[in-house]
């Protein structure tokens, strides 16, 4: 009986140790993915500012590039490593979004369509944001988005701006 108890305790200790090391490895992996996504975002921001300073290519009346070109990155554009490679690369904000500081959808929920793109670029303000993937809680997704983008939003989704209609339209 004593041998069975000792064997059970040993199995439980081994299981606990295995769970601890698995959790530690998962945490390191998630942090490495986060750092890579942050580096990609910073690379995008630097290139937008650099191209705006040069006035190179098509820029809008505010002096910002109208889009982000993959050739700016020597053929290897940065990826948002928090999302799979199946997600679109970057979404360019439309004119109705030029006054926004964040994309209406901060979480990429679908690989279909631009709202699921890993990055969002607003040529109205020269702002680049990285989206996050779904997490277990909205609170965790908001914390991750804020940490990644250096912001302090309190909602994952915002209303999409509508074009203002004037008389005669």
Image: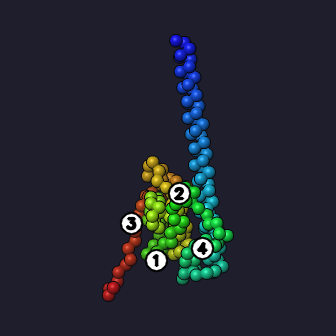
Give the CA distance from mark 4 to mark 3: 28 Å
Residue 163 visible in the picture: yes
Give the CA distance from mark 2 to mark 4: 20 Å
Question: In the rendered structure, are the residues bearing label 3 and label 1 in contact, judged by CB atoms less than 8 Å apart?
Answer: no
Side of 126 where 157 appears, left or right: left
Task: In the rendered structure, find residue 69 and report the number of the disc placed on it.
Answer: 4
Q: Nearer the viewer, mark 4 or mark 1?
A: 4
Question: In the rendered structure, are the residues bearing label 2 and label 4 in contact, judged by CB atoms less than 8 Å apart?
Answer: no
Determine the residue positioned at 43% across, 52% down: 138
Residue 124 lies, in percent from the top left, at 51, 75
Q: Nearer the viewer, mark 3 or mark 2?
A: 2
Give the CA distance from mark 3 to mark 2: 23 Å
Residue 145 visible in the picture: no
Of the image marks 3 and 2, the number of the one nearer the N terminus: 2
Residue 120 lies, in percent from the top left, at 52, 67
Side of 25 where 137 appears, left or right: left
Location of residue 47 with respect to 108 vertically, above or below: below
Tag 2 residue = 83
Of the image marks 3 and 1, the number of the one nearer the N terminus: 1
Determine the residue positioned at 53% across, 67% down: 90
The C terminus, quarter of image: bottom left
Of the image marks 4 and 1, the number of the one nearer the N terminus: 4
Tag 3 residue = 159
Location of residue 7 with respect to 89 vertically, above or below: above
Give the CA distance from mark 1 to mark 2: 26 Å
Classify mark 4: helix, strand or loop: loop
Q: Nearer the viewer, mark 4 or mark 3?
A: 4
Q: Looking at the rendering, which quadrant does residue 27 occupy? A: top right
Question: In the rendered structure, are the residues bearing label 3 and label 2 in contact, judged by CB atoms less than 8 Å apart?
Answer: no
């Amino acid at each position: 009986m004593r041998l069975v108890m000792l064997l059970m305790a040993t199995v439980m200790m081994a299981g606990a140790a295995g769970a601890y090391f698995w959790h530690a490895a998962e945490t390191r992996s998630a942090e490495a993915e986060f750092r890579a996504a942050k580096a990609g975002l910073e690379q995008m921001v630097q290139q937008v500012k650099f191209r705006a300073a040069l006035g190179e290519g098509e820029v809008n009346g505010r002096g910002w590039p109208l889009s982000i070109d993959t050739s700016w990155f020597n053929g290897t554009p940065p990826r948002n490593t928090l999302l799979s490679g199946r997600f679109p690369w970057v979404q360019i904000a439309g004119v109705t979004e030029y006054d926004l500081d964040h994309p209406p959808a901060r979480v990429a929920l679908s690989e279909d369509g631009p709202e699921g793109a890993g990055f969002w670029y607003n040529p109205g303000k020269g702002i680049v944001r990285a989206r996050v993937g779904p997490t277990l809680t909205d609170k965790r997704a908001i914390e991750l988005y804020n940490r990644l983008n250096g912001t302090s939003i309190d909602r994952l989704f915002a209303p999409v701006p509508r074009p203002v209609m004037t008389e005669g339209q």
